[in-house]
Amino acid sequence: MLIPYSIMDNYSTRDVAKKLGMHYITLQRYISSGKIPVPKIIKIGGSSVRAWSEEDVEKVRKILPTIKNGRKTRYKKTQSVKTKKK
C-alpha cells in the first residue's frame, strides 16, 4: 500500500504532546472529549495511527488557551471565595 505523503513530515500523538508541553494522556483526553480536532488516521502495516501535520499542531496550539481545565476553574473559584470571606 502506498501512502500519499511522507510519514517523516508528520508527528505522532506523543510527539505532538511534547511539542505542546503537555502530557500524552491529557492530549488523549482532549481528543476523546472532542475538545480538539483529530488529524487523519492512516494505516501503516496493520496499525492505524494519527499523522499530525505542522498545521494540525498549530490549530491545537491556538485552541488550547480556550479549553477549560476543571482544576484551574475550581482553583479560581476557591480563591475568589477565600478572598470574599476576608
Image (cartoon, rainbow, N blue to C red):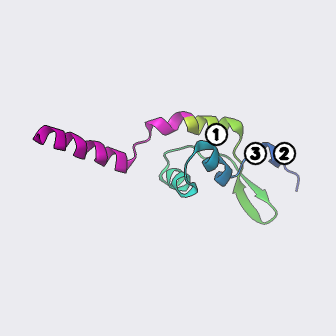
At mark 3, the secondary structure is loop
Q: Earlier in the sequence, mark 3 or mark 1?
A: 3
Regarding mark 2 in the picture, which secondary structure is present there?
A: loop
**Does the magenta portion include 5?**
no
32 displayed left or right of 76: right
Q: Nearer the viewer, mark 2 or mark 1?
A: 1
Q: Residue placed at 57% from the left, 39% from the top?
A: 60
Q: Amino acid at mark 2?
A: Ser
Q: Are marks 3 and 1 in contact (CB under 8 Å)?
A: no
Could you give the CA–CA distance between mark 2 and mark 3, rounded to whole angstroms? 7 Å
Mark 1 is on which residue type?
Answer: Val
Residue displayed at 82% across by 63% down: 45
Would you name the residue on which mark 1 appears?
57
Left of 25 or right of it: where is 49? right
Res 85 → quadrant: top left
Quarter of the picture containing the C terminus is: top left
Q: CA distance from mark 2 to mark 1?
A: 17 Å
Image point 71% across, 57% down: which residue? 49
Tell me the kind of residue under disc 3: Asn
Identify the image quadrant of residue 48.
bottom right
Q: Mark 2, residues whose alpha carbon is within 10 Å: few (<14), some, or many (≥20)?
A: few
| Residue nearest the observer in this picture, 3 or 67 | 67
Query: x and y percent of residue 46 in the render?
Result: 78, 66
Residue 82: percent from left, percent from top: 17, 44
Marks 2 & 3, CB-CB < 8 Å contact: yes
Residue range highlighted in magenta: 62-86
> Which labelled disc corresponds to residue 6?
2
Q: Can you name the residue that lies furthest to the left here?
A: 85
Q: Report the residue marked by disc 3.
A: 10
